[in-house]
Image (cartoon, rainbow, N blue to C red):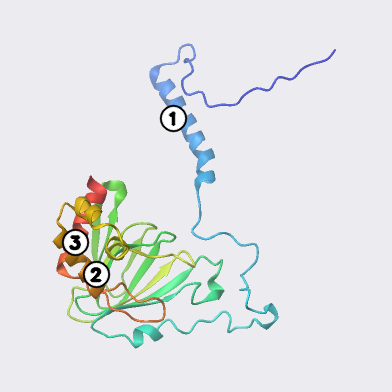
Amino acid sequence: MAYTLQPRPIAFQLDRPPHAGENDMAVLARRVQLLFMACAVMVPLCAHAGDPDILTDFVVPAAVDPAQINGTFFTHTGLLAGVAAADPAKFAVTKATAAEFPALLGQSVSFASLVYGAGTVNPPHLHPRASELLLVVKGTLFVGLIDAARNGTVCTQTLAAGDMFVFPKGMVHFQFNNGTGEARALSAFGSAGPGTVSLPAALFDTGIDDVVLEKSFHTDAGTIDVLKHDNQLAPAPAPAQSAGAALLSRPAAMLLCLVAGFLFTS
């Protein structure tokens, strides 16, 4: 006698009729259970790390002879060089990412050293590929982030030396030295290339049409021109191993507050 096996489809049937004697609460509980089962299956498929996993202990750059690798390859000495030469009245940052320290390739870590002159700010920005853990080592800093999941709630804190603050991946955040002396901090990132998107630069230094900016911020052409001019006078922090100024003008600071309001409440 021959048997024919018919394939049986597998699916989550959230709307099938209830079992005999099953009340509404039991039906709801069963549906919630199935929903959690579906989420448990889908979450691993949707999760992506900031850096890809590697199949070796470390990555050897193409220009490096593996036979010549020694302790020097795993050493970086330039983290404090840029900030040591920086103008103490300005904001400066020196980075140690895979671009400056190739041994970090595939390691999902990087570092930065930051110096804040009195009254200077690290303007609102985000890191698309990593969370940031900030440690204040000198002075005080007023820091904050925008929680988009809670309708743009702004979470702020004043940090003293020894305090830490975490900025989750992709969240807009800032640091401001509102004291009278210099402040210093160290930042660790969960990626060898965390990336940085500065809001002032992205909005006013990328060629976005003035009409788009005027309508987005409900302002006039004159205000947009002033903001673009201010942003050119106050460039974003210099790239790794160099120092740069980033003083944020009062008009720019006011408009950035409007940005947060329009992005997360409209």
Amino acid at the residue labelled 2:
Asn
Residue 253: percent from left, percent from top: 19, 65
Instruction: Identify the mark nearer the N-term, 3 or 1.
Output: 1
Q: Tell me the residue at 43%/61% (across/down).
A: 130
The reply to whether dot 3 and dot 1 touch (C-beta < 8 Å) is no
Marks counted in the figure total 3
Amino acid at the residue labelled 1:
Val
Quarter assignment of residue 213: bottom left
User: Within 10 Å of the Cα at label 3, are there few (<14), some (14-19), or many (20+) other Cα atoms?
Assistant: many
Quarter assignment of residue 250: bottom left
216 sits left or right of 107 in the view: left
Residue identifier under label 2: 231
- Looking at the image, can residue 121 be seen? no
- Residue 33 in the image: above or below residue 90: above
- Cα–Cα gap, marks 3 and 2: 11 Å
Q: Residue 32's mark?
A: 1
Q: Tell me the residue at 63%/73% (across/down).
A: 60
Between 160 and 171, the residue placed more toward the observer is 171
250 sits left or right of 27 in the view: left
Residue 166: percent from left, percent from top: 35, 62
Q: Say what secondary structure mark 2 lies in.
A: helix
Residue 131: percent from left, percent from top: 40, 61
Residue identifier under label 3: 224
Q: Residue 107's mark?
A: none
Nearer mark to the viewer, of 2 and 1 = 2
Quarter assignment of residue 21: top left
Q: Tell me the residue at 46%/32% (across/down).
A: 35
The reply to whether dot 2 and dot 1 touch (C-beta < 8 Å) is no
